[in-house]
Image (cartoon, rainbow, N blue to C red):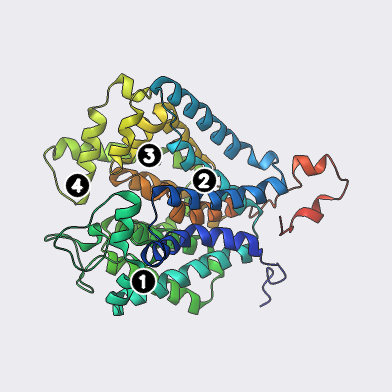
Amino acid sequence: MIDKYSTETRNSYVIIVAASSVLYNCVLAIINAHVVPLGFSHVALAEILVLFAGLVFILRKGLGEEDAGALFFTAFTLVMAIYMSAINLMVFVDYLRNILIIFCFATLGSWANRRTVKAAFMFSLAAVMLVLMCEIFALALYADIFEPGYYFETTRGLKPPEWDTTGLFGNALGFEGRLSFGLIGHRASSLFLEQVSLSNFAGIVMMYMLYFWDEMKRGMRIVLIACVALILLTTASRTMLTFSAICVVGYFLFPLVPKLVNLLTMPLILLAGTMMYVLQPDAKGDNLSGRIVLTMRHISEMDLYGFLGFYADKAAFFADSGYVYIVYAGTVFGMLAFWLFVSLYPAGDTPAQRRLAQALPIFMFFNLMIGATPVFTAKIAGLLWLLVGHARHQTAPRAVSLSQSANTALPRQSFQRLDYP
């Protein structure tokens, strides 16, 4: 059987930008450990450079009608950031940065062909698994190369426990009663240096499999399943274990569900959270019920000023309660805009598109119940939105941009596989 995509040319620039979003953190950790101590500003600068590289590509291509949804969402968030800064008497652009990551990589994905997207994922996955193997079988070497605990101390101000001598990030050490499969003595982190991003990376790979499964060879399917299984077993993530099970069932069910049902995902998850809060109001601890009840408790304690964005300085304290974080950082209107964008932006024409379109809001809004930063950080959001942006144009390749169409009379077909900025 001839692969109809075999003639496509991989775009090395997009692959490098996408892979950089995954790798930059561990590169900074190596510099921090062996060259010169870094601070949070260096991490922010690295992320800005990755975004800038992506935006350069986008601006060279030009923006067209296909970008209207993502552009409007980003422009709305910019307006809300200006509003938030004005009423809080401080420059507050944290949430805007999160949305810029979504805009940048979704638009990059809309220009990337299948071979480019696949190469970006496979390169990133290979790097993650290589470092994970080092962490599993040579923990001392892993800690010596990256010094995760020291990295988070210098860049985030998070000091490792005094009793810890491993050099790992403190949250990766686990504690008595924490879910564990006993494969290793801690929760794996790989090149992300912390376990939450690694477990969410497994969720991104699951969505990649949902989308490309029908055209994968048997060997690739086995490799990807093995990679996801190893990550889940070594991170012991309850959230991603649940999400992975949903994806397995969803492979068969999602194509049967109309795309507009996506709009019900967030309300249903919030309703389930409310029911859990009513039934177990005193639930505590680092488990699903405890984290969900904590989020619902925080929501119940919010007042009108919080919903309208007057407490921007409180947003950083709710990294484990995503819905509260978004409202404090972007107002209730920002939360509604995020809900609509995540639910409606993905395409839903083909079975593969519907699988991804249904999985995306489940991943996002389920995650927001127990965290905030994992779904927004570039090291996770980059590949995810690259995939979503690409899938959006599977059945309708991008036309020439508005800026290009104003300056050339070349036919549309000439631009459908343009691969370089």
Mark 1: few/some/many CA within 10 Å (<14, 14-19, 20+): some
**Taking 409 as reference, is 261 left or right?**
left
Q: Residue 102 carries which label?
A: 2
Q: Which of marks 2 and 4 is in front?
A: 2
* Mark 2 Cα-neighbour bin, 10 Å: few <14, some 14–19, many ≥20: many
Amino acid type of the residue that numbered disc 1 sits on in the rendered structure: Ile
Q: Name the residue under label 1.
A: 145
Foreground mark, 1 or 4, reads 1
Of pointers 3 and 1, the one earlier in the residue sequence: 1
Mark 3 nearby-residue class (10 Å; few <14, some 14–19, many ≥20): many
Q: What element carries label 1?
A: helix
Question: Secondary structure under badge 4?
Answer: helix
User: How far apart, in angstroms, are the residues tagged by discs 2 and 4?
Assistant: 29 Å
Which element carries disc 2, helix, strand or loop?
helix
Nearest to the observer: residue 181 or residue 59: 59
- Mark 4–mark 3 Cα distance, whole angstroms, equals 17 Å
On the question of residue 194 being in view, the answer is no
- Give yes or no for contact between labels 1 and 4 (Cβ–Cβ under 8 Å): no
Mark in the foreground, 3 or 2: 2
Determine which quarter of the picture holds residue 31: bottom left
**Mark toward the start of the polypeptide (1 vs 4):** 1
Label 3: which secondary element: helix
Q: How far apart are marks 3 and 2 (CA)?
A: 19 Å
Q: Residue at x 17, y 35 (%)?
A: 278
Front residue of 356 and 47: 47
Q: Where is residue 346 in the image (x, y as percent from the top left)?
A: 54, 46
> In this figure, which residue is indicated by the disc labeled 4?
289
Measure the alpha-carbon separation of dots 1 and 4: 37 Å
Give me the disc on residue 401. Answer: none
Disc 2 marks a residue whose amino acid type is: Ile
Pinpoint residue 232: horizontal percent, then vertical percent: 31, 66
How much space separates mark 3 and mark 1, taking CA atoms? 41 Å
